[in-house]
Image: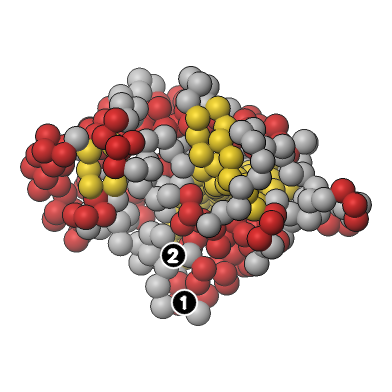
Amino acid sequence: MVSYDSRYNETITADDGRALRVTWFVPAVPRGAVLLAPAMATPATFYRPLAGWLAEAGFLTMAFDYRGTGSVAELKAETGDILRWAGDAASALEALVGAADGLPVTWLGHSLGGQVLPFAHHGLVDQAIVVASGNGYWRYNTPAVRRRAPLLWHTLAPSVIAATGYIPGRRLRIVGDVPANVMRQWRRWCLSPGYFAADVPRVGDRVAHVTTPVTSVWFTDDELLTAAAIDAMDDLYRGTPVERLRLDPASYGLDRVGHHGFFRDGGRPLWESILLPRLAAVPAEIVAPDPVEAGPAGAPAPVDGPMMPVG
């Protein structure tokens, strides 16, 4: 794993002036840069095993949290929606590109983190890899989720928001903790066949403008999304080649991957075989060794004070 002192927290500034929490994972000799764009209600800390592995493999990596996803007070006070979170991802990308100093950049998006790629400055990205990222329309859900969807969207979500001011999903064992307006918008999208077309006019044209090569990864045991959901999203990328990987966990010696397992520590066989060959990188033979006295190459300067160790 990446050494302790090559990893640190800081804040960056979003396009509207809000501070966003990020964690940098800094390699000794960088040959590429990776943005880890998170799924709904999934904190940056969830991605630490993969981010550390990426840094060890030579990739300057940023993990970040969408705004309003910290304390209960933050969740209740947050007024932003998913499109605002897309702006946060776009700001994170620009911060990474600035720190990468010309290195090739990969957007590695998990679920929602893949969906929001078309809302960022995707021309800055050399390669996009999206995992378990599909159209969230409820009829594209797996049968078990589809059976529960009407109760969630028509009864539970509205009543819980009215009572608590947010969705305490971890306590309810659904989704995760989510700000109210994010959940309201997600409800509209999941009840619409066009998903984010419910709020974004001509979203198909927006996605079609992406020219960055895309790899779409989905595992057959995904407990939330069907292959139809993934295909519906991938089909929107009319302006770029999409490599569609539909994979059986057993083919990699794994009992289960599901919607989140690719990013867990147990997913290392997948990182080696699926991820590493597809990351945008400078060829290894032309990567110069880092000077011994210079410290970690590619390390961006902290914005808000000295480096802070990650607990």
Q: Is residue 40 left or right of residue 270?
A: left
Please name the residue shown 78% across and 55% down the image: 28
Identify the residue under disc 2: 261
| Residue 124 image offset from top left, x and y in percent | 65, 32
| Residue 101 image offset from top left, x and y in percent | 77, 36
For the rendered model, the colour scheme is: secondary structure
Point out the image quarter for the N terminus. bottom right
* Amino acid at circle 2: Gly
Please name the residue shown 24% across and 50% down the image: 169
Q: Is residue 40 left or right of residue 205?
A: left
Category of crowding for the residue at label 1, using alpha-carbon neighbours closer than 10 angstroms: few (below 14), some (14–19), many (at least 20): few
> Which residue is most to the front?
306
For the residue pair 207 and 116, the one nearer the viewer reads as: 116
Residue 9 seen in this snapshot? yes
Please name the residue shown 13% across and 41% down the image: 160
Q: Is residue 174 left or right of residue 90?
A: left
Identify the residue under disc 1: 254
Which is closer to the viewer, label 2 or label 1? 2
What is the quadrant of residue 97 in the picture? top right
Category of crowding for the residue at label 2, using alpha-carbon neighbours closer than 10 angstroms: few (below 14), some (14–19), many (at least 20): some
| Residue 252 image offset from top left, x and y in percent | 52, 75
Vertically, is 206 above or below 174?
Answer: above
Please name the residue shown 11% across and 38% down the image: 163
For the residue pair 170 and 285, the one nearer the viewer reads as: 170
* Amino acid at circle 1: Leu
Q: Secondary structure at mark 1?
A: loop
Whether the residues at callouts 2 and 1 have beta carbons within 8 Å, the answer is yes
Which circle's residue, 2 or 1, is located before the other in the chain? 1
